[in-house]
Amino acid sequence: MDKKTKMKFNVLAVFVIILFCFALTPVTLQNDTYYTIAIGEHILQNGIDMQDPFSWHEDLPYTYPHWAYDVGTYLVYQLGENIGIGGFAAIYIATIILSVTLGLVLYYALNKICKNQLVAFLITIGVVYLLKSFIAARAQLVTYILFVLTILFIEKFIETKKKRYAVYLIIIPIIIANVHLAVWPFYFVLYLPYIAEYILAIYTESDIFRKLQIKWYKYRIKKLTVKNKAKEKIEDLTAKVDESQSKLEKSIRRKDERRKNPYRIVLRKESNVKYLIIIMLVCVFTGLLTPLGDTPYTYLPKTMEGNTMDNISEHLPLTLIQDPKTLTVIVLFLLILIFTDTKIKLSDLFMITGLTLMAFMSRRQVSMFVLIGAFVFAKLIVSLINKYDKEGTDKVVQAMTSFFGKIITILLGILVSFTLYKGKIGNPYVSQSTYPVQACDYILENLDVENMRIFNEYNFGSYLVYRGIPVFVDSRADLYTPEFNGAKNEEGKYEGRDIFSDYLNISNISTYYENKFEEYDITHVLIRKNSKLNMFLSRDDNYVELYSDNNFVLYERE
């Protein structure tokens, strides 16, 4: 295929990917975006003080786990306010730009690694569609882009050993540690499949045990020869040396044959991986290049020790029957691996197996399974194409870049994108059925915000933070757990304020709400009308209804 045709297809692919990513970007903002704006403003005004300024609980430490993204989001918000389009509109535009960037970077990386434009384009479209529920104005959108680049740079470094890829690989974890440090440890997970393959290749190629056995026999022969006795023993050991040497040579020949024509799993000793290990070890120290101290090293272990991962929806284990899209992807992988003679690199097998296990452990990791697994899937598909119809994709590309082909592709891209986008037309930036917009207006106009101690729900606490109303809890869940606001005792357990568990127990009516409200000296309660707690408060004479709409109700506690 000539360069001109390749260029035409690239232009066509980029146009369709931009349209598709734009159509999939949600208009209505997500929960975490609201506190992100408030935190970004706070950092610019007060710096990183490692203290929470937004809940009414006193002296809660806060780690600012994505401070750089928070600041960037607030600056975008403020820019929108200053130029008159509105802060939320500016954030929506920024999210579109990040979404499009993710699509284009993924297409570029897939194209570079699998070296097939059509496969790279189709898989990019599929991946972006599968990630649509993860596309939001959150720090994760930036880290998705960085993880795609990480895979690209690792693969290119192993292939070429060019220094610039090593530099890029060192810069990326520095960015992650400041933009979204919760996923900083995952950066190192991406290295592990390559390193594991390298170590196994060294082990299997070296026949280390048989070589050590031969050396031991020769050592014993030397000792016995010096003593000039035990001739029968020497002869026996010499025979064992010859036998082991023969087996070693046969083993080497068999491995050479397997390397030339492997059955299913390709095991290669990539010499540049040893330098990749050095790069990874250097990157371990990049966690220190933040204003947050040792937080990149402690944040994930503390989170895993707490109970937030057991109670927040996105951290719960994956149930395949409830996620048919992920089930379909897993089935496609299995069909290719089982029912075709496609060969897979051992590092790719390790990668996809590890990603699958992580996805089963947490729904949030489904995004990593889809995003990083795309590279493995692309290699398998290209391997199939090269085996059965090597020229087939070139013919499809030429057809798509013909005059009528371009028109059909563009029209189809516009049609699909519009179908996805039309459901978002007229959507507000803030959903008043999800967030208590009017209730907040009432609070700010009629109540003494500085002296009230409100009990609110987790799912809209961030919006209250954005509106400047001190909260009981919000979606910065870790902030409200002993692991982050307490210290370890002599038994190695964290002691501190377990506000998050108290919130869960109150909301689920697993504890008597009045006792906890008395403990926290609650003055007001803002909850959803259809909540369990409202069933009790609406019948409790000690709670006076101050405000009510179709979705939310505000009580004053007497």
Image (tube, rainbow, N blue to C red):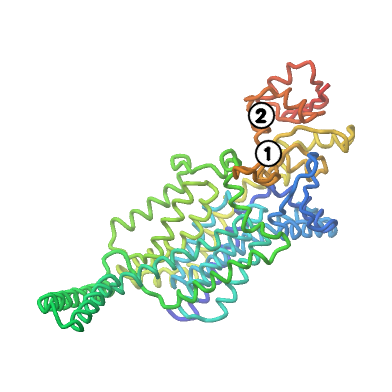
Could you tell me which residue is drawn at 63 percent across and 62 percent down? 176
Q: Is any part of residue 426 visible from this angle?
A: no
Q: Is the residue under label 1 in contact with that under label 2 (CB below 8 Å)?
A: no
Q: Quadrant of residue 313?
A: top right
Q: Residue 10 location in percent, x, y?
A: 53, 72
Quarter of the rendering occupied by the N terminus: bottom left
Residue marked by disc 1: 459
Could you tell me which residue is drawn at 65 percent across and 65 percent down? 175
Q: Is any part of residue 158 visible from this angle?
A: yes
Compare residues 373 and 46 and report the one nearer the observer.
Answer: 46
At label 1, the amino acid type is: Asn
Tell me the element at label 2. Answer: helix
Tell me the element at label 1. Answer: helix
Q: Residue 408 location in percent, x, y?
A: 50, 63
Compare residues 65 and 29 and report the one nearer the observer.
Answer: 65
Residue marked by disc 2: 507
Numbered disc in front, either 2 or 1: 2
